[in-house]
Structure formats: structure tokens, C-alpha cells
Amino acid sequence: MGTRHGLPDLAADEWKDAERLAAALNERFGHLPAREIVAVAVDLFREAGGIAAISSFGADSAALLHIVAEADPALPVAFLDTGQHFGETLDYRDQLAADMGLSNIVIVKPRDEVVAADDPDGVLHRSNTDRCCAIRKVEPMARAVAPYRAWFTGRKRNQASTRAAMPVFEAVGPRIRINPLARWTTHDQAAYMEKHALRQNPLVAFGYLSIGCFPCTTPVQPGEDPRSGRWSGKAKTECGIHLGGLETVLSPSA
Ligand code: SF4
């Protein structure tokens, strides 16, 4: 590949096979500290299909963004603007980007025609959260990552039982999803925020420890699972943007 961190033991066809590529990347780089994983991945994928970060600018987003900014402040950072976010989150997005010198925030919105047809009054979340997430998050997410071979998330294994076995490098269709903070604990996250004096989403001070859309996010009590404030009272635990099958919702024109 001609990169500083090249994969000389991977033949060209192996590089094209995302499952084998993810396995090789985990074996070689998965044990590294988050900062090195980000540096390696930026180096590798910048020359091989492109790489971006995805951020919700939520409660835990600042650490990954700080690491990304250190590696390349011009790296694309996609934000899914569902149209249902807290105003505080939108302000935080802009403030954090300015703090860190992130110069390429890519705002991805739901398709106007789909929202007009399926959720013209913005209340679909009351009757069908899965469909609402599908049109406001999952399809835009697929469009957001379509231009790249790989993308970073800030997900951690300790955030949910569905993430307990999450690898650092994952194949998603032909693409690679990278979770540099997979092994981080709550303490690691807090210590990094403090060490680098990172700005916190103001909603955290009000008990919002996992922040998504306004209608589907509630504060949690001290000691409660942070993600229990997402779709509280419903069986739903994930919006779908991180689940398998994301590639199947990519529209042909995306
Ligand atoms: S989190 Fe709630 S408001 Fe946001 S897209 Fe999903 S269902 Fe709709």
C-alpha cells in the first residue's frame, strides 16, 4: 500500500475483503492505545478509500474528537442532524469543533421527501421509533459513510451489553468501522476529559449521560446505566446506525 503502517502480508485480494482486512487489522493494531489506532488508521485509509469520523456530539464525544483532531483536524467528521436534536447539542457541536480546530464537519440530514411523506409533523417517534430512526438516522448514516472505506466511532464495550464483545476493527459490508475507544472504561473517559480540559456537553450537568434526540432522551439517576435514558420504557436500545446490515440501506444514488 506504500503507507507508513502498510500491511505487507496482505495481498491485494485480501485488502479488498473487508472481513479479512478487519481481522488482520485487529491482530496487528487492535491492542494499541486509542491515539495510535487513530493515527495508524488515518495513515492507512487516507490512501486507500478515505476515512472519516462519525460523532453525535453527545456526552462522551469529545475524547474521540480530540484524538482525531490531533491526527488530522481536517478529517471529515460527520454529524447526523436528525432534526430532533437538543439545541444544546447543536451549539456544543459548533463550540467543540472550534475548540479543536476541526475544519471539516459534514452535516448529514434526512431526505426531505422521505420526511415529508413519513413524518411531516415530526411526531413519528411517538408511534414508531424504528421507522423514525430508519429515516432520520440509519439512511443518513449510510449516506454519510458511503464516500469512505472506513470510519471511526467513539463506542465502548462498557456502554451496552450489545457492545460487550465489540472489536476495534469491524467489517460493515465492504467498509471498516473502527472503534478506537472500545476498551476504554468510564474512568478512562473521565480521566481523558479532565487531562485535556475538554468541553462537556452541557446536558451532562442535568443528568443526560447518553444523549440522542430530544424526544427519546431522558436524564438518568446517579448509578443508573447511562444508556437507560435512551428510549426509556421501550425495548429499543440502539437506533440501528451501528448494527449489522447498515450497508443494505445505502441508496443506489448515494
Ligand atoms: S432517536 Fe427518537 S426522534 Fe431520533 S430518530 Fe430515533 S425515534 Fe426519531
Image (cartoon, helix red, strand yellow):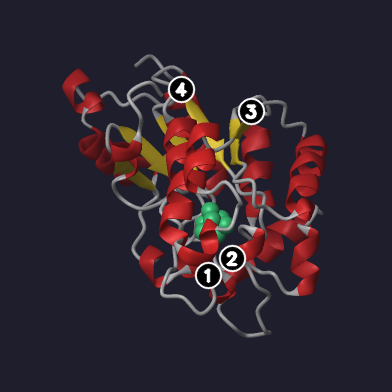
Give the residue drawn at x 50%, y 33%: 113
In the picture, the disc for residue 50 is 4
Find the distance from the CA under tag 3 to the CA under tag 4.
13 Å
Say whether disc 1 or disc 3 marks the residue closer to the N-terminus. Answer: 3
**Residue at (19% x, 27% y) in the render:** 14
Q: Whole-percent x and y of residue 138?
A: 44, 45
On screen, residue 170 versus residue 98, left or right, reads left
- N-term-proximal mark, 4 vs 1: 4
Numbered-mark total: 4
Quadrant where the N terminus is found in the figure: top left
Real-space CA distance between mark 2 and mark 4, rounded to the nearest whole angstrom: 33 Å
Q: Amino acid at mark 4?
A: Gly
Task: Residue 193: give its label.
Answer: none
> Could you tell me how far apart the alpha carbons at marks 4 and 1 are, in whole angstroms?
33 Å
7 lies above or below 187: above
**Mark 2 closeness class: few <14, some 14–19, many ≥20 residues within 10 Å:** some
Q: Which residue is mark 3?
A: 72
Q: Closer to us: mark 3 or mark 4?
A: 4
Q: Which element is circle 1 on?
A: loop
- Note whether ligand 1 is within 8 Å of mark 1: yes
Q: CA distance from mark 2 to mark 1?
A: 5 Å
Residue labelled with disc 2: 216
Q: Which residue is mark 1?
A: 231
